[in-house]
Image (spheres, helix red, strand yellow):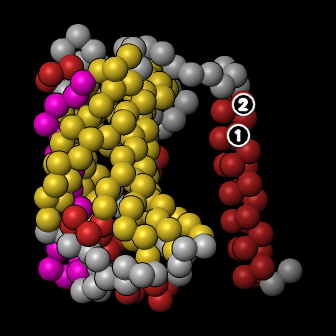
Amino acid sequence: MLPNKVSIALRTAILSVALSTSLVSLADAAAYHRLDASPAGSYRIDPDHSLAWFTIGHAGVAVVVGRFDKLSGSYTFNPANPAGDKVNLRIPAASINTNFALRDHDLRGPDFFNVREFPNITFVSTRYQPTGKEGGQLYGKLTIHGVTRPVTFQVREIGAGPVPALPKPWGGYLSGYEATTTIQRSDFGMDAYAGMIANTVHLHVNIEGVRTAG
């Protein structure tokens, strides 16, 4: 066997052993179930296990799904004092991805997000109002394309608790949420191609956070 082929085979074997070991350790963990410990604490959003995505009507015949490949932020949550809950989220607008490079190029341009002038999408909460044990309404200010508008997210807690099976920086005491809202893109100064692209945008944010303080 040639030296380069030996090297490739060796690396492949090492990778296979590493993956097998990881799968075994995960298989040894308890069966999958929702963690329902207290979500109280301050959290750093884990960008590797979080996602902001959207749906919007196209040409009156279909729905386009897009996402943002980067996001960061933090949140605090205290079921005993929801008035003190805070969420800060930042999304680089240039990370938009609709699975079509030409369309993404246009979306980054001046007709839409204009990422050179307005590089970030941000959300800063103003208050949280529980509507049940595991959900509520999150009020705040959403900034897109340099325009700030009030929005309300419908929030649902997915789970919370210690997750020792994941190594750092992903593991630890985690909590997760999903949040949804609907906006009109024209409210944020993005009304190009109104006859081809719907005005209503459905926003979805799935968040997993690592607790930094109890």
- In this view, the residue farthest toward the right is 1
Q: Position of residue 48 (x, y in %)?
A: 44, 51
Task: Give the image location of residue 181, x and y in percent.
Answer: 36, 47
Is the C-beta separation of discs 1 and 2 under 8 Å? yes
Instruction: Please check the rendered image and state whether residue 134 is part of the magenta-colored stretch, yes or no.
Output: no
Residue under label 1? 23
Task: Say above or below: 9 vs 100.
Answer: above
Q: As drawn, is 27 to the left or to the right of 87?
A: right
Element type where label 1 sits in the image: helix
Task: Look at the image and tell me whether residue 171 can be seen.
Answer: yes
Q: Is residue 161 left or right of residue 42?
A: right
Mark 1 burial class by Cα count in 10 Å: few <14, some 14-19, many 20+: few
Q: Mark 2: few, some, or many residues within 10 Å (few <14, many ≥20)?
A: few
Residue at (42, 27) in percent of width and height: 157
Instruction: Give the residue at x 24% y 86%.
Output: 110
Amino acid type, callout 2: Ala
Mark 2 residue element: helix
Quadrant in which residue 185 is drawn: bottom left
The magenta segment is 114-129
| Residue marked by disc 2 | 27
- What main secondary structure does the magenta stretch of the protein show? strand
